[in-house]
Image (cartoon, rainbow, N blue to C red):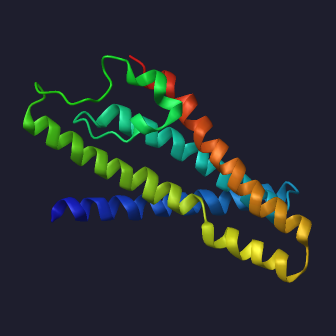
Amino acid sequence: MWHQLICLFAVAVGGGLGGLVRWGSMYVLQNLGFSEMVALMAINIAGCFFIGIAFLWLECSLRRDGSSRLSQISVTAKLINRDWWPKGDPTLPLALSTRLEMMYRVLAALLITGFCGGLTTFSTYSLLTARFASNHDWSSWGIHLLGTAVLGYLAVWLGMLCARPFVLR
């Protein structure tokens, strides 16, 4: 029970920090002359980049029990043949394994669910896209709708690619 409370607290802290970073970034970017669309797209793409880094780091650093989901992602193919790739470690004491799993859950709650969830915002993205459609601004609608999705995917992939050297040992 207390594990869930710790994760809940981590989500709250991460979400608060991510929301503050998003608000501050929107404020700064719009005061620099960027439109709301460009500012929001930049923040969402930065969040996608960060989630790629956080996911790869968490999976490679803390998933030692063979349950890593990274073996299915093409960007990590060169990492799988490393001797440290998480395939399960029978010498890993149970207490350490449990501690690593709890650390993984708390850090994932803090960084991925909390911070990235607070930083990026699908609801604002959807609202702005709907506003472009209602104003019949189809070029902005297409750029925002497809640009954020495509660039967001590329940013996650690039984040994971950039994080690879930090998990190679």
Q: Where, quadrant-wise, is the C terminus in this rendering?
A: top left
Q: Nearer the viewer, residue 63 or 31?
A: 63
Q: Measured from the top left, where is residue 95 in percent x and y?
A: 9, 38
Q: Where, quadrant-wise, is the N terminus in this rendering?
A: bottom left
Residue pushed farthest bottom?
Answer: 134
Image position of 151 (left or right of 156): right
Which residue is rendered at x = 23% and y = 63% of the image? Answer: 4
Which residue is rendered at x = 33% and y = 39% of the image? Answer: 68
Q: Measured from the top left, where is residue 20 in percent x and y?
A: 57, 61
Q: Is residue 34 above or below residue 78?
A: below
Q: Is residue 110 above or below residue 165?
A: below
Which residue is rendered at x = 80% and y = 78% of the image? Answer: 131
Image position of 115 (left or right of 69): right
- Quadrant of residue 144 in the image? bottom right
Q: Measured from the top left, where is residue 114 in percent x and y?
A: 44, 59
Marker count (numbered)? 0
Residue 28 in sight in this render: no
Q: Is residue 32 above or below residue 68?
A: below
Q: Nearer the viewer, residue 35 or 66?
A: 66
Q: Nearer the viewer, residue 17 or 49?
A: 49
Residue 11 in sight in this render: yes
Which residue is rendered at x = 40% and y = 34% of the image? Answer: 71
- Quadrant of residue 136 in the image? bottom right
Image position of 142 (left or right of 102): right
